[in-house]
Image (cartoon, helix red, strand yellow):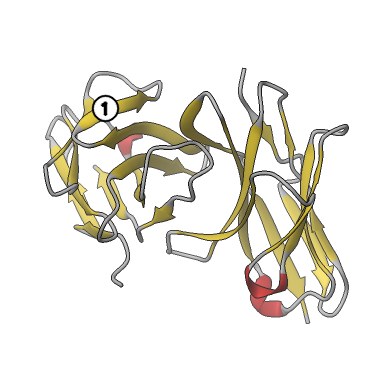
Amino acid sequence: AQSVAQPEDQVNVAEGNPLTVKCTYSVSGNPYLFWYVQYPNRGLQFLLKYITGDNLVKGSYGFEAEFNKSQTSFHLKKPSALVSDSALYFCAVSYVETSKIIFGSGTRLSIRP
Amino acid sequence: KAGVTQTPRYLIKTRGQQVTLSCSPISGHRSVSWYQQTPGQGLQFLFEYFSETQRNKGNFPGRFSGRQFSNSRSEMNVSTLELGDSALYLCASSSTSSSGNTIYFGEGSWLTVV
């Protein structure tokens, strides 16, 4: 079955420190992987995606993610967190066989000053 | 370029009523997807339309339906509303229905059922 998991409901990081938001996916065909961010009372905003090629993907607002096929993971990272990065982050997956995008449960990122 | 527009943004309905939500995709986008977001269930896929045809459907009861018009605008309808239908309904559009295509979300329609 196609699925994506975000094992942490909440991640707390001090401003200026590196941050990681974890995501793993089920192995079923060739996955396409996405990260989206949601600010309070807003829709989701696209951050980055992995389709093929370089395993390290760079996206908006200084975020990047690394595709790891052996560990079936696609963790979101940023070298230096900002308070304004505090939001709800969603990992998502789709497969070659279907255009449907499946979202993880979301991780709330809290950056303290 | 205007983004995905959803109307209305907020609405309150009574149990048993029906509701219609509207979505205008980004100009040139032909695929529209709908999602329900609740604190308990997270983001759940409702259905996807491409060129007026339903391409994919999530695991929701038949009370939830949708359609897409020739100009790619889409509507979703929920009949016989239940308290549990209270949620943020998100519409997303993309240029094609191909896998790997980025979808872009609207701000959502907040539905409260009382």
Q: Residues within 10 Å of mark 1 (few under 14, many from 20)?
A: some
Rendered position, B101 above or below B25: above
Residue at point 83%, 76% (across, down): A80
Q: Position of residue B5 (x, y in %)?
A: 26, 61
Tag 1 secondary structure: strand
Give percent across and percent down for residue B89.
34, 46
**Residue, x 45% and y 42% (percent of image)?**
B38
Chain hosting mark 1 = B
Nearer to me, B97 or B19 = B97
Q: Quadrant of residue A41?
A: bottom left
Q: Residue furthest front?
A: A53
Give the residue type that dot 1 points to.
Gln
Horizontal side of A100 relative to B111 (left or right) equals right
Instruction: Look at the image and tell me whether residue B31 can be seen.
Output: yes
* Residue B97, picture quadrant: top left
Position of B90 with respect to A91 (left or right) is left
Q: Is residue A74 above or below residue A38?
A: above
State the residue at coordinates (74%, 43%): A23
All told, the count of numbered labels is: 1
Residue toward you, A31 or A101: A31
Locate the N terminus of chain A by quadrant: top right
Q: Label 1 belongs to which residue?
A: B54
Q: Is residue B41 visible?
A: no
Query: Which x, y percent locates residue A15?
Result: 81, 78
Left or right of A26 in this view: B35: left
Q: Measured from the top left, where is residue B44 in percent x and y?
A: 46, 35
Q: Quadrant of the C terminus of chain A?
A: bottom right
